[in-house]
Amino acid sequence: MTGPAASEAPAGHGSGTTALRWLAPVLPLALFLALLTLLPAITGGQTVRVAWSWVPSLDVQLSFYVDGLSLLFALLITGIGTFIFLYAGTYLHGHPRLARFYLYLTLFMASMLGLVLADNLITLFVFWELTTVSSYLLIGFDCEKAEARRNALQALLVTGIGGLAMLAGFILLGTAAGSFELSEINADGAAIREHALYLPILALVLAGAFTKSAQFPFHFWLPNAMAAPTPVSAYLHSATMVKAGIYLMARVHPTLGGTDWWMWTLLLFGAVTAVWASLMAVRQTDLKLMLAHTTVMALGTLTMFLGAEVKIGIAAAVTFILVHSLYKASMFLVVGIIDHETGTREVDRLGGLRKAMPITFLAAAAAGFSMAGFPPFLGFIGKELKYEGALAITHAPVFMTAAALAANALMVAVAATVVFRPFLGQRTETPRAAHEAPWSMWIGPAVLATLGLVFGMAPGIVGVRLVEPTVEAILYRPEDVSLKLWHGINLPLMLSVLTVLLGLAAFRWRKPLAGGLNWLVRVLPTTGDRAYDATLAGMMAFATWQSGVLQNGRQRRYLLVVVATFVLAVGGTLVVFDGVAWPTNWSVPLYAWGVLALILAGTAGTILTRSRLGAVTALGAVGTGSAVLFLMYGAPDVAMTQLMVETLVVVIVALVLPHLPGLASRGHSGRFGRWRDCVVAIGAGTVVALLVLAVTTVPLDRDLTTFFEQASVPEAFGRNIVNVILVDFRAIDTFGEVAVVAIAGLASYALVKSARRRRGAK
Amino acid sequence: MDALLALTVGVLVSGAVYLMLSRHLVRFLFGLILLSNAANLVIFASGRTTLALPPLVPDGLEAPAVTVANALPQALILTAIVIGFGLLAFAMVLAYRAYQSLGTVDTDAMRVAEPDVNGAGEAAEEPAPARSEAA
C-alpha cells in the first residue's frame, strides 16, 4: 500500500473535511466520558438497565444493560475509538471519501456499542449484524481494489452465516428460557443447562461467536480483513469486531458455561487457534499481516480461558482483553505510521528508524514489552494470570499450559520482530524519507502504550474497579480479584522466564522457522482461504448447472418445472398433513353427468384433433359445458356471460387460426416427452381436484355473502345481488376490469396494425 | 355436488396442462382457454354449490327469504371470465404477430430473449430473425 494521503489528489481539502477531522473524535470522547461516569456505580456492584418497547407483538424490547462486562467493552470501544478517529483524520488526510469514511466508522462504533450494551437477544442480534455490515463497508473502503472487495465479501459471508446460526440459537435460547432478556436468562442459567435443547443452543451460539472471533477453522477471514485502511484494522482487531465473539461467550457464560461441553469446546478450539495463528504470525514478512495473525492468536487464548469456570481463569481472560486491546491498537497504529511515513511495511526493507521517529519508537517499545509480557507492564500481569489460570484448570492443566506457553513464546518473537527490526540496526533506504509523524497520529499509540505501563505499575487502578466487576458478571457471583505485579517466585514466574527464552530463540532463528512453516503451508491439502474459494466456486458452478437445467430458455421447460413443483409441493402437503378428503356423496342428477361427459369430450377432442375446425368446436363444447354447470347451480348471470364470452372466443380463435400453421405436430418431444407431459398433467389435475375437495370440506364463512344479501336492497336498491356487487360494492374493481379489456383491445389493435405496416413496407 | 365439480376441474386442468406443455404455440393457447375455464369452476366450487335459487331478492322483500346461491363467487367469476377473455384475445393476437415476425409457432425456436448459449439444441435449426420490430 502506498499511503492514500500521498496518492490521492487533494480533492477533499475543503474546510468541511478539515472541520470534520477535528470534530469527529469529539463524539467517541464524549461517549467515553459519559460511560466513565457509570464506573463508580458498577464498581459498587450495581447494574443499570433501560428498556423501550420495540416490537411488542413479538416481545422484542430495545433494552440495554450495563454491568462490569459491558462497561469494560464500551470503554474500550469509545476510548480506543477516540484515538482511531483522531488518527484516521491525518492518515487519510485529503482522501476524497474522508467524510464517507467517518460515516462508516461512526456507524460501526455505534453498532459495536449497541452490541455490547444490548440486553435483549434480538436487539443484540440486530447490532451484531450491523457490525457485520458496517465492517464490510470499512474493509472494502478501498473499493477500487479487487482484493479489498473480495476480502470484505469474505468477512461478510463468514460472519454473516455465523450470525444467522446465532440467531437460531438465540431463538431457541429465548424460547427455552421464556425470556429474551439476557439479564433474566443469566439469572437462572441452570435451567438452560439442564434443558433438552442445551446442546443445539450451545452449538448455534458458538457458531456465531467462533466465526465472528475468527476461531479455527474460520480464522482465515481476519488476516484478510487487513485490506482495510490501517486505522480500521487497528480498531477491528483491538477493541471491536473480533472481540464481539469473545464478548458473546463471556455474556452467555453464566447460562451456557460450566458444562463439560462448553469447557472442552472452547478449550480445544481456542488452543488450536492460538498455537496455529502464532505459528502463522512468525512466517509473515508484512508487519501488518504479522499483527493480524497475532490477533487471531489472542482470540484463541481468550476463547480457551473463557472455557474455564475457576475465577483465576476468567480473571486471566478479562485482564488479557484489556492488555491486548491496549497493545494491539498501539502496534497497529505504529505500523500504520511506519507505512505512512516510509512507504513500506515489509520488515526486510525497514531498519534504524529510531532516530527519525523517536516518539513512535518509544510507543512501539512500550507496546511491544506489554505484548511480550515483560514486567512492569500490564502484559506481564496478564501473562502471569494466564499461567496461573492454566495451571488451575483441573481438567487439562498440562495441555492448557503447553498451549499458552507455545503461543506466548511466539508472541515474544513477533513483538521483538515488530519493535527491533524497523527501529534498530542500520538505517535502510525506504520509498519515502522517514520522519516523525504528526502528533495526531502518535498520540494514540503513545497514550495507549503508556496506559499499559501505568496499569502494570499500579494494577489497583483497573483491578478492583473494572476487572473485578467484569469477572463477577461473567461468573455471575461475587468474587475478589486483585491484580498484583509481584507474585513471588513460583511456577508461573518460571514459565515466564522460559517463555522469554523460547521467544528470543524463535526470534534469533526466525528465518529457518519461517522457511519451515512456509513449506508446511504449501504442502497442506487445504487452508481455510482455499476452502472458502472452493466453496464459493462450487456454489457458483451448482447455480450455473441448475439454472441450465431449470431455466434453459425454453418456455415449456419453465412451465414443466413450475407445474411439477406445484404438484409435488401442494400434493405433498396434502398427503403429509392428511388433507386428502375423498368425496362420499356422489348423488348427482343424471343430466349433471351428461354435462361432465360433454366437458370431458371437449377436452379430449381439443387434445386429440389435428383439425383446426375440430379444435374450435371442441373448445366451444367445453365452454358451453361450463355455462350449463353455472346454470344448474343457480348462477344464470354467470352462465349468460360465459356463453357470450365463449361465442366471442370461438369467433376470435376461428379468425386467427387460419393465419397460423395447422395442428399436424402435437409438439411433445418424442414418446418419452409425451409420457412425461402426460404424467405431469394428470398429476396437476389430480392435485387441483383434491384441493377443491379439501377446500369444500372446511366450513364456509358466509359473513360477506350474508352482508351482500342484507345490504343489496336497502343500500344499493338492486334486487340482483350479483349485479349489485359488481356495479356498486366492487365498482372500482369492475372499472379496473373494463380498463384491462380496453387495454387488451388497444394492444391487439396496435399489434395487428404494426404487422400490416411491415407487410406494406416489404 | 362438489365431487362432480372437482372431477370436472381435474379433467380440465389435466387437459390444459398437457396442452400447455406442447411447444406448438396454438396448442398452448388452447390449454390457456381450458385453464381459465377450470379456474372459474374452482372459484365457483370454493363458494359451495347446491342446486339452489339464483341470488335474487324477490319484490317486496328487503333480503332473500330462502337460501339462495352464494352471490360473492359469482361476482368474482364474472370478473374472471371477462379478464380471461381479454387475456386470451391479446394472447391470440400476440401469437399471430409472433408468427408474422419469427416465422414459427414452435416455442423452442422463439429464443430472441434467451439465446441458446451452448449453441446446441433444437432451436439452432431455425434461427430467429434479429430484426427490431418496434413499429
Image (cartoon, rainbow, N blue to C red):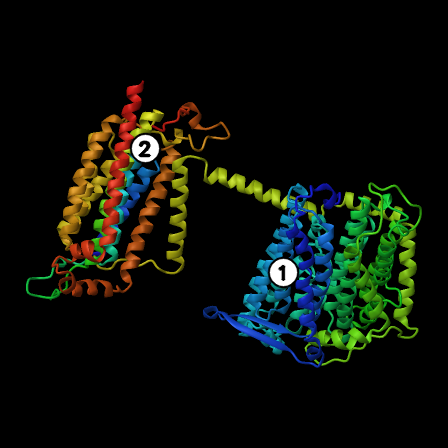
Can marks 1 and 2 be said to lie on one chain?
no
Check the picture and name the quadrant holding the N terminus of chain A.
top right
Figure quadrant of residue A159: bottom right
State the image coordinates of residue B6 (x, y, percent, origin top left): 25, 52
Most distant residue in the top direction: A762
Q: Is residue A14 left or right of residue B97?
A: right
- Front residue (pair A124, A443): A443
Compared to A647, does A729 lie above or below? below
Dot 1 crowding, Cα within 10 Å, few <14, some 14–19, many 20+: many
In the rendered view, does A579 fall on the left or right side of A658? right
Q: Is residue A385 above or below residue A663?
A: below
Q: Quadrant of residue A504?
A: bottom right
- Choose top left, top right, bottom left or bottom right for residue B70: bottom left
Residue assigned mark 1: A208
Question: In the rendered structure, which amino acid carries the disc numbered 2?
Answer: Leu
Q: Is residue A525 visible?
A: no
Along the viewing direction, whichever of A559 and A607 lies nearer the viewer: A559
The C terminus of chain A appears in which quarter of the rendering? top left
The residue singled out by tag 2 in the image is: B25
- Chain where mark 1 sits: A
Judged left or right of residue A76, residue A122 is left
Q: Is residue A705 visible?
A: yes
Instruction: Give the chain letter at badge 2.
Output: B
| Residue beneath the point at 39% across and 30% down | B110
Q: Position of residue A43 (x, y in %)?
A: 72, 78
